[in-house]
Image (cartoon, rainbow, N blue to C red):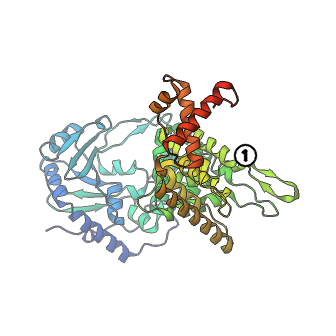
Amino acid sequence: MARAWTDLGLPTSVSSKDVNAPTPDPQRRARLLAAADAALRQLSDVLTPLGDRFAAAGHELYLVGGSVRDAVLGRLGTDLDFTTDARPEKVQELLRGFVDNQWDTGIAFGTVSAVKDDQQIEITTFRADAYDRVSRNPLVQYGNSLEDDLVRRDFTVNAMAVRVGPGELREFVDPLGGMDALLAGVLDTPSAPQDSFNDDPLRMLRAARFVSQLGFTLAPRVHEAIVDMASQIDRITAERVRSELDKLILGDYPIEGIDMMVETGLAQRIIPEIPAMKLEIDEHHQHKDVYWHSLTVLRQAIELEDGDPDLVLRWAALLHDIGKPDTKRNEAGGGVSFHHHEVVGAKMARKRMRALKYSKQMVDDVSQLVFLHLRFHGYGKGQWKDSAVRRYVTDAGPLLDKLHKLVRADCTTRNKRRAAALQATYDDIEVRIERLAAEEDLARVRPDLDGNAIMEILGVRPGPEVGRAWKFLKELRLDRGPLDRDEAEAELRQWWANQQDGSAPSE
């Protein structure tokens, strides 16, 4: 009969860490462990035979790291991480005939990956790596014990393990006080944080990511170490930094994670445009704190999400005002202006996201939203003609729904009357868009004549003239809406005549 974790006499104190945390509640500990044990019982079809295979071969197998942490927190997904004393080649042999598929892309680092019943499995041989502390590349060394493996992990909440097998016996192992840290909501390192971050500086950014994902805070010594060592993040490749940033911004508490990066100096090294938004408020309070305004916009944009977390929308909300510091002007009479900050901000967003190695599509989408976020304010009380509404929709393209959310989120005024007026005005523009969409195909505004028709009417071959004519017809379509064939041909012929006699500038 399987024994529950709560029967196993768990450690009750953090091992000599300077974590200023309250004494964990034993009853809450017991409840969490019991719930985690129940969650793992649901995976018995995978865990039990896997544990039996390793035990029969004389090897130990432990569920470890984030899998144990997430089981305790009630958020266990389909990724299962294990560690073992078996070498990778033996792991491959033991998995053969049991898993649905396996591959060895991580075998150079002692990891074998596999899939079994929709569960992603990663099994890594005990590690006791050393680091060159110049790149980040570990000198892969296999350890001799679970304790060797756990002490090299990033945070104590990720240094807990559950022994799997034989049978359904599950033993909870927590030599570093990870459960106490988890119960207190504190991120601490198994060893001195300076040593941990020197081994892999990405762990500093990972701390910010866990703040965002878990809502935890940093142990004082961890915070101090990151402040002192923030410049070490420069050793990490842009691709690895980007991966952590995305996980951070998609977390449940991204504002806390971002603020932790700013307060420790990490943001200054990675994305300095964010701390640069901490503009000093002028004595007349003519502008908001741009930094906290941007975090508020991010929070409000998240509240408007209607499905999974939206990475593009969240990045656009965070970066929409990064052009303000470079465009700030003190005006006569004590006022402050940020003219064209959306143009400058879009260029800055594009430059920074390229430096972080984002895809072209991601760079284009975020920078376009930053560029368009102020366009709505020209709408006034509905003075836009239908042509302006068409251009708004066309310029947003497939980003229109995200733009709607960004513009609404950008209203952070405490003046309830002004806030209500802005939302009502945006309601109006959305109604007009729906009306025009019902009358016209706004999602695909195209000229009333295609390229073949243009060449036939003008008697020209494929070339630049066709492109200029197409652009003219699209502008005409945006201004006047759909035209019938005769009207479109007449306008095209008149435009062409003007081009030929020089009475109109070339497009």
The three-letter code of the residue at mark 1 reads Asp
Residue 134, percent from left and from top = 51, 34
Q: Nearer the viewer, residue 384 or 499?
A: 499
Q: Nearer the viewer, residue 395 or 344?
A: 395
505 sits left or right of 221 in the view: right
Q: Residue furthest right?
A: 333
Residue at image point 60% right, 47% down: 479
Q: Is residue 240 above or below residue 167?
A: above
Q: Nearer the viewer, residue 284 or 149?
A: 284
Residue at image point 32% right, 56% down: 67
Q: Residues within 10 Å of mark 1 (few under 14, many from 20)?
A: some
Q: Is residue 500 above or below residue 39?
A: above
Q: Nearer the viewer, residue 483 or 339?
A: 483
1 sits left or right of 119 in the view: left
Q: Is residue 251 visible?
A: yes
* Residue 469 sits in quarter: top right
Residue 217, percent from left and from top = 52, 62
* Residue 144 sits in quarter: top left
Residue 172, percent from left and from top = 28, 62
Secondary structure under the numbered disc 1 in the rendered image: helix
488 sits left or right of 327 in the view: left
Check disc 1 and report the residue beneath it: 326
Residue at image point 52% right, 57% down: 436
Residue 457, percent from left and from top = 50, 30
Which quadrant holds the N terminus? bottom left
